[in-house]
Image (cartoon, coloured by chain):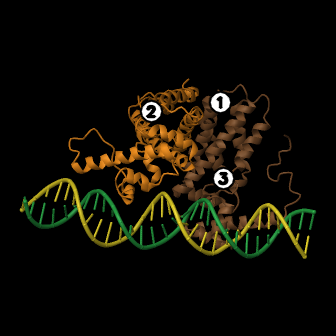
Chain colours: A brown, B orange, C green, D yellow
Amino acid sequence: MVCVMPGRQQTDPAPSLRERKRERTRRALVAAAAKLFARKGYDETTVAEIAAAAEIGTRTFFSYFANKDDVLFPDSDARVRATLAAIADRDPAERPVDVLVRALAAAAEDDADLVGPMAAVRTRLARTVPAVRGKALHVQMDGQREIVRALTEAYPELDRVDAAALTGALTGAVGAALDVLMEDEDAEPAALRARLRKATDLALRPWRD
Amino acid sequence: MVCVMPGRQQTDPAPSLRERKRERTRRALVAAAAKLFARKGYDETTVAEIAAAAEIGTRTFFSYFANKDDVLFPDSDARVRATLAAIADRDPAERPVDVLVRALAAAAEDDADLVGPMAAVRTRLARTVPAVRGKALHVQMDGQREIVRALTEAYPELDRVDAAALTGALTGAVGAALDVLMEDEDAEPAALRARLRKATDLALRPWRD
DNA sequence: ATGCAAGTCTGCATCGGGTGCAGGTTCGCC
DNA sequence: GGCGAACCTGCACCCGATGCAGACTTGCAT
C-alpha cells in the first residue's frame, strides 16, 4: 500500500499488440469526438460520425464506450484516485476534514483530467448540454460514494452519515462554486484556485472548529 | 411545447373544463407509470405502454411530459419552493447561513414530494436505474441554482461564489446524508419522512452553533 | 344553435442512440 | 502452421423523441 505514483501503474511490461492497437483507436475516438463536438456541438454530432472519423464501424464504438456520453469522460476517476491516495497517506493526527481539504488542494494542483483534448470541450458542454451535465453529476456522485467508503474505513469511529455529510458538503461546495466561477470564459487558473479556496473555507468553517 | 403548468396558486375559482380534463389525464399518466414501473421496472416499461394504460395516444404523452423521466418528478419543485419561501420570510437579523439552515429544515418538514403514488417507486429507481438517478441529480442541481439566486437577491452584499459554495455545502451535506440513509429497502412514506428529518438534522448540525 | 378560432389529440414518418446476433478477421500462443 | 479466443462489423430491430398534418374538442361571441 505504499508507492503512490499516480499515473503509471507499476505493471506494464507487456502491452501486447492487441492492447496497443485497442488503446490507439480508443484515443483516436476521443480525439475525433473532441474535434467534432467542438466544431458541430454535442447533439449535432452522431456516433456514426465519430466512428467514421476514427475509421471504425459504428457498432464498434459501443465496444469502447458504453454510450455516447462516456467518450467525454475517458479518465473520470483520476481525481477520485488522488483523493483516495491522500486518505491513504494521512497523518495520524489529521482529522477527516483536514484530509479532504488537503486532497482537494492536491487535486487542484496537478489534475491530469484537466489536460488532454477533451477537457476544454467538456467543461463547456457540461454547462450547456443537459445530457452531458447529467453524466458529469453522475460521475461525481460515484466518486463521492467511493470517498465516503474510504473515509469510513480510514476512520472506523466516524459515523457513516457524518462521513457522507462531510464529503457531500465539501464536494457540494466545490461543485457549486466552480459552477459559478466557470461562467467567466477567460479567468486565470491561479486566481480561480484562490477564489475557490476562499469560498470553500468560508462554507466549511463550521466543520473545522 | 406546453411543459409548465404554473402549479396551482391559491387562485382556482375557474378551473375550466379543458384544464380539469387535462389535469385528470396527467394524474392518470403518473398513476399508470407508477404502477407499471413498480411491476415491470423502468427500462422494461415503454412510453407506449404508459400512454395506453392512461388511454391516450403515444404521441400525446410528450405533450404532458417532455420526456420519459419527467413523469417520475411531477412535483419536483415543491422543496425548492419551500426553501424560497423561507428565504422570503427571513428575519432581518439572520445571517445567510441561518436562513439556509432554517429553510432546509422547513423543507424537510412539509415535503409534498414525498407523498403521491410516485414517491416510493422513485426512491427505489433512483438508486438502481442510471437514467433516473441522472434525472434526480439534474433536478436537484436546478433547484440549488435557484436557491443561490434567491440568496444573492436577499443579501446583495453576499458574494455570488460564496453564496454558491455555502448553498452547495448545505445541500450537498443533506443530499449525501440522505443517500446513505436511504440504502434500506423500506419505502413507506412515514419511514421516508423520518429519515429525511434525521438526515437534515444530522447534516446541518455543524452549521447551527 | 351556429360558426369560428384556439387548443388538443392522434397517427405517421423519421431520426438517433443502443443492443443482439451471426459471420468474418485478427491476434496470441503452442 | 494452425487452433481457439478475442475482436470487428454490418444487419435487423427496439425504443425514445420530434415534426407534421389532419381531426376533434372547447371556449366564446354572435
| Residue designated by label 1 | A160
Q: Which chain hosts label 3?
A: A
- Place of residue B191 in the rendered image (x, y in percent of width and height, measured from the top left): 50, 28
Residue that numbered label 2 is attached to: B107
Give the numbered dot on residue A189.
3
Q: Residues within 10 Å of mark 2 (few under 14, many from 20)?
A: many
* Left or right, residue B87 beside residue B178: left
Identify the image quadrant of residue A119: bottom right
Residue B141 in view of the camera:
no
Residue visible at 71% across and 34% down? A151
Q: Amino acid at mark 2?
A: Ala
* Position of residue A76 measured from the top left corner of the image (x, y, whole percent): 68, 52
The lab-note entry on whether marks 1 and 3 share a chain reads yes
The image quadrant where one finds the C terminus of chain A is top right
- Subunit bearing disc 2: B
In this picture, residue B44 sits left or right of residue A123: left
Say whether mark 3 and mark 2 are on the same chain: no
Amino acid type indicated by mark 3:
Pro
In the image, are marks 1 and 2 on the same chain?
no
Kindly report the distance in space between the C-alpha atoms of the residues bearing marks 2 and 3. Answer: 37 Å
**Residue density around tag 3, few if under 14, some if 14–19, many if 20 or more, within 10 Å:** few
Quadrant including the N terminus of chain A: top right
Query: Which of labels 1 and 3 is toward the front?
Result: 1
Residue D21 point in image, percent of width and height? 31, 72
Q: Earlier in the sequence, mark 1 or mark 3?
A: 1
User: What's the residue type where badge 1 is placed?
Assistant: Arg
Up the image or down, A59 lies above or below B95; here it is below
Mark 1–mark 3 Cα distance, whole angstroms, equals: 34 Å
Q: At x 65% / y 56%, what residue is drawn?
A: A73
B205 with respect to A114 (left or right): left
Q: Secondary structure at mark 3?
A: helix
Answer with left or right where residue A95 lies relative to residue A129: right
